[in-house]
Image (spheres, rainbow, N blue to C red):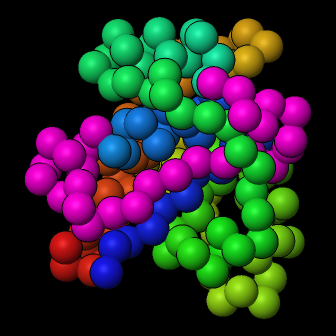
Amino acid sequence: MKTGILFVCLGNICRSPQAEGVMRHLVEVKGLGDRFEIDSAGTGNWHVGNAPDQRAVETARNNGVDISGLKARQVRAEDFEKFDYVFAMDRDNLADMEQMASGAGLSPHLFLEFAGTNDLQDVPDPYFGGTGFADVYRLIEAGCSGILKHIQKESKT
């Protein structure tokens, strides 16, 4: 049985598709690709069906990860039945996920909870600038690495 992981941000075109791509890459490199189902989604519906932001695609590509084929989608109620882990990129999205997940028996987590970045709780949204895509990507790499270690420790995978 595969372990399901869902990454969630606001529009599913910047942070969460990068996390999906990085996690897929990590599990493939470790020879664990067949043990995981990895996806991403957004709480908003503005970008449904769109490819990730070109800046996110380029940043991922520069780090050896291809996310160009991904398409944005919105979180659905059944995601909380389908996935074992749901990771929100920030506290606002976490609050939305907690509300949606109530009664599903699944507790969403903040993405950086397992990243070892004690000073940060939220992955900044690079869409409107302020924080660069490369900086966000480094946080995503740290988060995915910590999440994978946590899951492997928890499930002894």
User: Residue visible at 44% across and 55% down?
Assistant: 38
Q: Is there any visible trace of residue 11 in the rendered image?
A: no
Quarter of the image where one finds residue 63:
top left
Quarter of the image where one finds residue 52:
top right
Relative image position of residue 60 (x, y in whole percent): 42, 20
User: Residue visible at 19% across and 73% down?
Assistant: 157
Residue 155 shown left or right of residue 75 in the figure: left
Relative image position of residue 80 (x, y in whole percent): 66, 75
Quarter of the image where one finds residue 133:
top right
Q: Name above or below for residue 75 compared with residue 9.
A: below
Q: Is there any visible trace of residue 154 in the rendered image?
A: yes
Residue 148 shown left or right of residue 8 in the figure: left
Does the segment drawn in magenta span residue 44?
yes
User: Residue visible at 55% across and 18% down?
Assistant: 56
Q: Name above or below for residue 15 compared with residue 27.
A: above
Does the segment drawn in magenta span residue 114?
no
Q: Which segment is the magenta one?
A: 25-51
